[in-house]
């Protein structure tokens, strides 16, 4: 469809349709439905915070409804599964066959890490990395915990990475090791030829070709976006993204479009649909592509979103780990959810209606009942905090329960840190990975 302008509402519907929203939740989700959903998105961002559910499970649930998480585990967490990990957006699961598209990034990380201002860290771990290569060659894929011992010096402001973990992550950035699934949600590392077909990374496309392909995929996944939107999807440099956009426009895959209320130029993928309506009911992970680029979420939905895990409890506005509520093509509210696994209850610690939006409490109640069933819980309870709490409790047919101090702190999850390098706002703690919302590497 050839369009030169889009209304703000049309742009939202284009984006959500491109992201796979609009279908009815299914009671039986096949493996091919999971793989096609991931294929549409291109990747699943990883985060270890497990207050409600780990992030990578949630985008699939938001789009297809309840599914067997063990099936996704077999796809993403096993040594021979079809998905691997890399710094694609932040740390993310992506098809193993897509790893060559990031060979240029691996090379750029190596060049960056050996610059004078960073080379000391590389020199410190040189001996460790030699030993790790030999150990992996002899014993096969291993997690860092299988190599570490008390003699290792613990470093770092969060969980204290040892030289073993630091060395493995350096090698992972450079493509000297790759992921081979996870064990207890800890990344397992392998030499490339132990899990990939021979020569996979050696036959990668050059940087301009790879980046053009990544921008093509980002534009399909977003439907419509600005240069910043397209760059952020795979954390690309703005100038590289602009060059790729020019190529795709010339090839007829992207077309310039003016979007109501957007100050920046935008591009529409030529296969994007402009549906009259998108029927959607979902709670979104903070790392769902709909909201992971906060500037886009604010421009497209008027939704100002920040994660408050690191904010002291008395200063939080909405809650500890808050999920946006999507209803049709609007973000109408937010809920702070916790899976109380001991009691078998999904606890809504706060519930808020967005100013100027209409939050349909009955629809949200149905969404949360589905979420509770998917998590294996017997019911949903709602605390008395938030502008939508009373209406939501009424729609669920339950009484409000008092908001308690325990609703503001989550023990082991209190710092939100991911032991594989990305904290709860997607930032690589030791500076190894892409900076949120910015250029990945030079």
Image (cartoon, grey):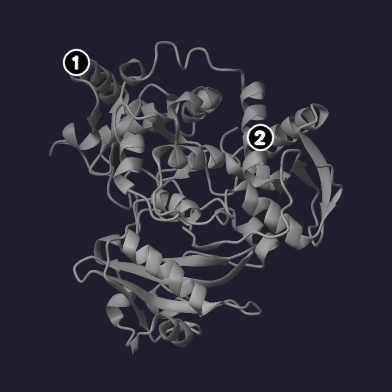
Instruction: Check the image and report above or below for 260 versus 83.
Output: below
**Residue 11 picture quarter:** bottom right
Decide if residue 396 is in sight here: yes
Numbered badge on residue 364: none
Q: Residue at x 33, y 48 (%)?
A: 68
Real-space Cα separation, disc 1 to disc 2, in angstroms? 39 Å
**Residue 161 picture quarter:** top left
Q: Which residue is mark 2?
A: 215
User: Is 18 on the left-hand or right-hand side of 226?
Assistant: left
Residue 52 image position (x, y, % from top left): 34, 62
The disc, 1 or 2, on the residue closer to the chain's N-terminal end is 1
Q: Residue at x 76, y 38 (%)?
A: 270
User: Is 25 on the left-hand or right-hand side of 346?
Assistant: right
Q: Which residue is mark 1?
A: 138
Which of the two residues, 284 or 229, is positioned nearer the viewer here? Answer: 284
- Residue at the extreme right of the image, as rendered: 4
């Amino acid at each position: 469809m050839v369009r030169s302008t889009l209304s703000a509402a049309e742009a939202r519907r284009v984006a959500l349709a491109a992201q796979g929203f609009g279908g009815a939740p299914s009671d039986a989700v096949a493996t091919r439905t999971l793989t096609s959903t991931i294929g549409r998105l291109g990747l699943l961002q990883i985060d270890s915070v497990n207050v409600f559910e780990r992030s990578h499970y949630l985008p699939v649930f938001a789009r297809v409804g309840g599914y067997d998480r063990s099936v996704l585990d077999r796809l993403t967490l096993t040594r021979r599964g079809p998905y691997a990990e890399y710094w694609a957006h932040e740390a993310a699961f992506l098809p193993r066959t897509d790893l060559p598209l990031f060979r240029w990034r691996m090379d750029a990380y190596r060049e960056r890490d050996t610059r004078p201002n960073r080379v000391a860290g590389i020199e410190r771990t040189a001996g460790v990395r030699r030993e790790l290569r030999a150990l992996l060659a002899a014993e096969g894929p291993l997690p860092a915990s299988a190599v570490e011992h008390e003699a290792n010096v613990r470093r770092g402001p969060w969980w204290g990475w040892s030289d073993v973990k630091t060395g493995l992550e350096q090698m992972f950035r450079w493509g000297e090791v790759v992921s081979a699934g996870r064990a207890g949600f800890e990344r397992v590392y392998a030499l490339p030829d132990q899990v990939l077909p021979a020569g996979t990374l050696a036959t990668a496309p050059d940087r301009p070709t790879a980046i053009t392909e990544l921008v093509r995929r980002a534009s399909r996944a977003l439907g419509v976006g600005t240069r910043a939107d397209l760059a952020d999807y795979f954390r690309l440099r703005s100038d590289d993204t602009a060059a790729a956009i020019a190529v795709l426009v010339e090839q007829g895959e992207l077309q310039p479009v003016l979007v109501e209320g957007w100050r920046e130029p935008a591009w529409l993928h030529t296969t994007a649909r402009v549906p009259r309506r998108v029927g959607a009911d979902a709670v979104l992970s903070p790392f769902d592509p709909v909201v992971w680029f906060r500037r886009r979420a604010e421009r497209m939905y008027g939704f100002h979103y920040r994660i408050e895990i690191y904010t002291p409890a008395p200063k939080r506005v909405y809650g500890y780990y808050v999920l946006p509520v999507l209803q049709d093509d609007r973000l109408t509210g937010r809920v702070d959810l916790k899976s109380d696994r001991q009691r078998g209850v999904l606890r809504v610690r706060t519930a808020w209606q967005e100013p100027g939006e209409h939050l349909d409490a009955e629809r949200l109640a149905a969404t949360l009942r589905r979420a509770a069933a998917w998590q294996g819980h017997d019911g949903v309870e709602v605390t008395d905090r938030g502008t939508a709490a009373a209406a939501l409790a009424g729609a669920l047919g339950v009484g409000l329960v008092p908001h308690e101090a325990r609703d503001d702190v989550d023990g082991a999850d209190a710092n939100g840190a991911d032991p594989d390098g990305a904290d709860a706002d997607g930032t690589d703690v030791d500076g190894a990975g892409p900076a949120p919302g910015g250029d990945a590497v030079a």
